[in-house]
Structure formats: structure tokens, C-alpha cells
Image: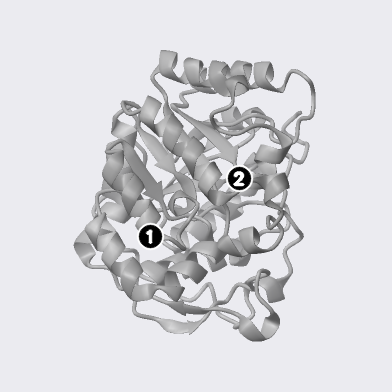
Amino acid sequence: MTQTQTPPPPPSFAPAIEADYNRTHIDFRAPMPRPKVRGPVIDFHCHLFAARHAKDWFESAQHYGIDAFVSMTPLEEVAGLLRDWPGRLHFIAVPQWMYEGPDFYSDWLRRIEMFYNLGSRIVKFHVAPQTILKRDRLDSPRLRPIFDEIRARKMMIMTHVGDPELWYQGKYADTNKYGTRDEHYQAWEHMLEEFRDTPWIGAHMGGNPENLGRLQYFLDKFPNLVLDCSATRWIAREISNRRDEAREFFIRNQDRILFGSDQVSGDDRGFDFLASRWWTHRKLWETAYIGPMPITDPDLPPDQQPTLRGLALPDEVLQKLYHDNSARILAKANIQLG
């Protein structure tokens, strides 16, 4: 792949239509104060797919006070972004997600080495139900060489385990085909037990924001585990649905949660599309806003779109969410952003 080619999109990628990301007609360019945070605001989970997307990305991010990013970017795009945006990006080592060749795992090992040589110190595993069906469970023997490489290089781990509960009730309802959520989390627990000394990031609130009790169990059992709060539509919907419980959870675990947007760049995803995600996150974490989501939720009918209910987190919690926790994790690998 050359830098002039379109990087492979995630499975859910679709052309951006304004009605989908601004159904409430917000002026996303209206002035917005920066978060009241000492140090750079770090988005620990995003997907800046190509160097040609960076101008709109950083312009929109600057408007919303987001300074630095931990991104899952195709290897072929990394060098150009490091050159053009120094100090603003750290890259997570990822495989060629769409690659179907028989040497997928050996290619992934080579890519980990190349990412590492470009400064990457985190490896991402995507083990949602549909990915397990296509590839392997997290505790599969075929992934053992990847885990051995991570341990040898003293890298960190990020995992996407689980998916929205609405999906388990719908497209994953065939448990003979997809397995159960409990089975998926048993595999995660097995690997967390083995890698207790490795910093580990559970993406998308550990993939189960619908069950904060499950997440508390994992945080209590594994001190090396932190969660990121990425995946805008999913997280905003489920956090809002249990607003008071979620607020207590964030305050209780204020040292263990990283801000992340799961922002995804694209050729047709300009300033306003990107802004819709950062606007939603800032309203969710910083304010007591109660109102409609600007972003259409495809998991719900048009007449049942979710209400956004902001947590109005205390300033000291926001300081840790937006900066301190991410900076501490990155410092374990001598990485400083912003």
C-alpha cells in the first residue's frame, strides 16, 4: 500500500451523511472553551487512517481542545504522520485487519517489529464476536507467538473484547455460532491472569458499559488494567442510560479510566463529522447536559433515539481522565505526548 491509496476502512465504515452526524443542527464551529486541564488533553483511542486526513483532524481537534492522540493507523501511513505532526501521535501496533492471506499471523509479527522500530509500544487485539468467528479467541494457541513477542519487547496490550449488548441480543443471538459474552470474558480473564505485570487497556469500557459490576470485578482483580471510554455512540448511549451509576463508577475508578473517542477519519469525514464526536464526549463528561444526541444511533429506531445525559464529573476526575492517567501509562514506556 502506498500513501496515495485509501487505507482499509473498519467493517462499519460508511459514507458520512450530514443527517447522520448532526441531526440536531448544531453549529460545531461555535466557540468552545478548552477543558480545564493542566497539560495536553490526550485521546487514547482513535483511528487516524491517513496522512491526507490530518489537516481536518487536527483543526477540529484543536477547536475542541484535544491535543494528542494514541491512534490505530495503518503501518504504511505512520512515518508521514510522525514527520508532519511530531509529538502529537503515538501509534498502536495493529495487523492488516482486512488481510485474508494464510500468513496473517507471521505478517502481524513483522508489523509489530516495524511499529516498534517506529516507536510504538502498544499492541491491539480485536476479539469482538464477529472477529473471533473470522480468526481466533484471545486465548487461542495461534495468538501465542504474538503474546510472546509482546512480552519479549515489554510492550503494552489493548483489547477490544465484547460488543454492545444490543448486538448480543440481535446479530450475535446464535450462541452456537458466536459463543456467549461470558465465554468471551472468560478468555479475557485467562489472559489477564497470565499477563498481570503488563499494562493492559480495555477498550470501550472493557466492551461492556452495560454491566459496570462486571467492569468493577475486573478492575478490582487486575491492578494492571485500565479502561478507555471510547466508542462515541455506544458509550454515550449506555453511560447516559445509567447516568448516576456511571458517575459513581467514574469517580470511584478515577485513576483507572482513559479518555478516548474512537474517532475514525475518512475522505468524506471533515471538520463537522469529527467535531460531532468530540462535542458529544465533552458534553457527556464535563457537563450536566440533558438533550438529544446529534449523532444518529443506528442500533435504535428513529423514534427511539437516545438522550444524552452528562455526568458533570468533578474537575479532579476530568484532570485524570483527560491527561494524568494517559500520561502515566505512556510514561511507563518513556513516551510523552503534546
For disc 1, the marked residue is: 212
Provide residue 146's location: percent of width, then percent of height. 55, 20
Provide residue 110's location: percent of width, then percent of height. 62, 16
Provide residue 83's location: percent of width, then percent of height. 53, 31
* Nearer to me, 232 or 58: 232
Above or below: residue 20 compared with residue 194? below
- Residue 41 seen anywhere in this rendered image of the structure: no
**How many numbered badges does the structure rendering display?**
2
Above or below: residue 199 compared with residue 326? above
Instruction: Name the residue rendered at 59%, 26% in the picture.
Output: 140
Determine whether, in the image, residue 103 is placed left or right of residue 27: right
Instruction: Name the residue rendered at 62%, 58% in the picture.
Output: 168
Going by the picture, which residue comes out furthest to the top?
152
* Nearer to me, 312 or 87: 312
Mark 1: give few (<14), some (14-19) or many (20+) Cα within 10 Å: some
* Nearer to me, 129 or 148: 129
Instruction: Name the residue rendered at 36%, 67% in the picture.
Output: 285
Going by the picture, which residue comes out furthest to the front?
176
Q: Quadrant for residue 48, please give it.
A: top right
Q: Amino acid at mark 2?
A: Ala
For disc 2, the marked residue is: 128
Q: Are marks 1 and 2 in contact (CB under 8 Å)?
A: no
Q: Quadrant for residue 152, please give it.
A: top left
